[in-house]
Image (cartoon, rainbow, N blue to C red):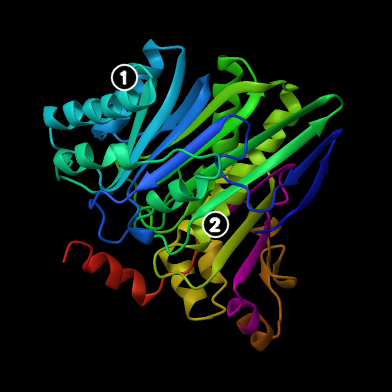
Amino acid sequence: MECGIVWIMAAEIEFLPRGTVTSPEGFFAGATSAGINERAADKLDLAVLFSEAPCLAAAVFTDTKLKAAPVLLSQQRLKEREKFGAVVVNSGCANAYVGAEGLANAAEMAGLVGEGIGVAPEGVLVASTGVIGVPLPMEKIRASVDRIILARDGGSELAKAIMTTDTFAKEAAVRAKDGQSEFTIGGAAKGSGMIHPNLATLLGFITTDAAVEKEFLQKALKKAVDASFNMISVDGDTSPNDMVLVMANGLAGDAPPAPFEQALEQLCIYLAKLLARDGEGATRLIETTVGGAVNLAQARAAARAVVSSSLVKAAVYGADPNWGRIMAAVGRSGAEIKESKFDLSIGKIAVVKAGKALPFDKSAVIKLLKGKEVPVSINLNLGSSSATAWGCDLSPEYVTINSQYMT
């Protein structure tokens, strides 16, 4: 866990040691083994996140036309209700594409949790991840919910319980100070395969003790997700279960808008990079920054095109300095480009300047490509907008994992 202080304008933003989704005041979590997910870390596969004070909530969801039951239920509840008290989540079964039974099971799971902790069933949101097309094993869930012990230090249990093919739990928390205001934002996320811009097989749970208005919370989350979770790609696929949810209980008092947005974005970027680093079969993190674009949308499109390219990913895995694949990916991104202005560097080694290949030390670039992190810098020299995207290499292990997922 990297810790430190980031100074942005007047706000001090600090990553907390061992920070997690229960680091903000008033949040509790716990998990148990319900026997749903055979791959579960420590056998944990059913978890609850709870706030002792009712929370405003906001979320972004997958944009697929075929959404899983938990997504449909949570979307509807967020439209109909102002405050929420808890989230229940399981791994191992997506509860997707099973018809009306899926909605009924998601609602029952929320009801079981609400009854146990004294929250109205409608005040419990639901998330699931795992195999698609399989009904939730409700008999296992009914027998297991009461075993969940909610604790202030239970955030790490939740982070483990939501894992599927992840190799490690993703969690963090930041504390922000701005004048007399101090608040904390915590988060846990999962995702390793089916990761692509516009969300993916990705669940993110974010909590804060800051007091903010609901409309602002939704806008701040969307802005942070666009700069983080929507800027990562592992394999170009997405799923019907994706969501990033933020809950704010207000126990720390009012938070200034700008520091809150900054802290939320810092946290989301940190978690998103962990997801990209842990891509299925991945051995390297690819970080691509595109500058000089005519606008932010085009900068993001160009950066995402590079980290999404199977050819670029394969070249990085093989430490093959085939920079033409990078340039070709930007060329098809939809961003405005002039070949005569295109600059490209791998690490600090310039390989293209003004559209022309430069002589470079091939062995030095190969060494960079063999590192744990591969930085790629592109300047389109057409404007002032920039963006960064993250991805990973493509290894034979990815094919192995996804050719044996159910066998």
Per the model, the C-alpha gap separating discs 2 and 1 is 33 Å
| Residue 379: image location, x then y, percent | 70, 55
Mark 2 or mark 1: whose residue is earlier in sequence = 1
Numbered badge on residue 274: 2
Outermost residue, bottom direction?
A: 363
Magenta stretch: includes residue 248: no
Q: How many marks?
A: 2
Residue type, label 2: Leu
Q: Is residue 70 left or right of residue 191?
A: left
Query: Which residues are drawn in magenta?
Result: 367-389
x and y, in percent, of residue 62 in the image: 37, 36
Q: Secondary structure at mark 2?
A: helix
Q: Please name the amino acid that badge 1 sits on.
A: Pro
Q: Which residue is mark 1?
A: 121
Q: Nearer the viewer, residue 155 or 76?
A: 155
Q: Position of residue 46 (x, y in %)?
A: 32, 44
Residue 186 sits in quarter: top right
SS label for mark 1: helix
Residue in the image at 65% along x and 78% along y: 368
Left/right placement of residue 397 relative to residue 209 reads left
Asked whether the beta carbons under mark 2 and mark 1 sit within 8 Å of each other, the answer is: no
Up-down: is 402 above or below 70?
Answer: below
Q: Is residue 106 above or below residue 368?
A: above
Q: Is residue 356 above or below residue 158?
A: below
* Image quadrant in which the C terminus is located: bottom left
Viewer-side residue, 220 vs 366:
220
Residue in the image at 68% along x and 69% along y: 356
